[in-house]
Amino acid sequence: MKKDMSWMAKRAMSPREVERTVKALGLTQAAVARFIGRSERTLRRYILGDAEMRPAEVLLLRACLEEGWDPVIPPWTPECN
């Protein structure tokens, strides 16, 4: 039986989808932000609709949901200036 891979064609997420995805993964916004390599502020902007997620970020989060992957969250470190 072939697995449904239609989620791969959806390369955008609405603000509501971003919020639901964070909840569905069972992670905090901070953890999801670190996982996709963004700041918490940027993730909040995605959720508020002030910015759009990049297609690679969308596909990564969708893959985690659809394939049942557990995201590996890197530890927080202060950014170097």
Image (spheres, rainbow, N blue to C red):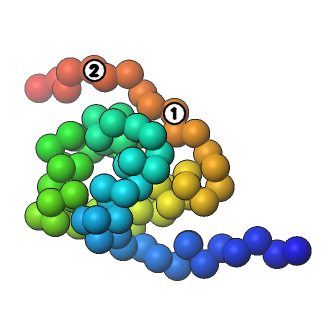
In the rendered structure, the answer to whether residue 24 lies left or right of residue 34 reads right
Residue lying at 45% horizontally and 40% vertically, measured from the top left: 26
The amino acid marked with disc number 2 is Thr
Q: Height in image: 62 above or below 42?
A: below
| Nearer the observer, 9 or 24 | 24
Residue lying at 46% horizontally and 50% vertically, measured from the top left: 24
Q: Height in image: 79 above or below 36?
A: above
Residue 15 lies, in percent from the top left, at 25, 65
Quadrant (top left/top right/bottom left/bottom right) for the N terminus:
bottom right
Residue 7 lies, in percent from the top left, at 56, 73
Q: Which residue is mark 1?
A: 72
For the residue carrying disc 1, how many other residues have a C-alpha within 10 Å: few (<14), some (14-19), or many (20+)? few
Quick one: SS at disc 2?
loop
| Nearer the observer, 60 or 18 | 18
Tell me which label, 2 or 1, sits earlier in the chain.
1
Quick one: SS at disc 1?
loop
Residue 50 lies in quadrant:
bottom left
Q: Which residue is mark 2?
A: 77
Residue 34 lies, in percent from the top left, at 34, 36
Residue 66 lies in quadrant:
bottom right
Quadrant (top left/top right/bottom left/bottom right) for the C terminus:
top left
> Dots 2 and 1: beta carbons under 8 Å?
no
Residue lying at 22% horizontally and 57% vertically, measured from the top left: 47
Residue 46 lies in quadrant:
bottom left
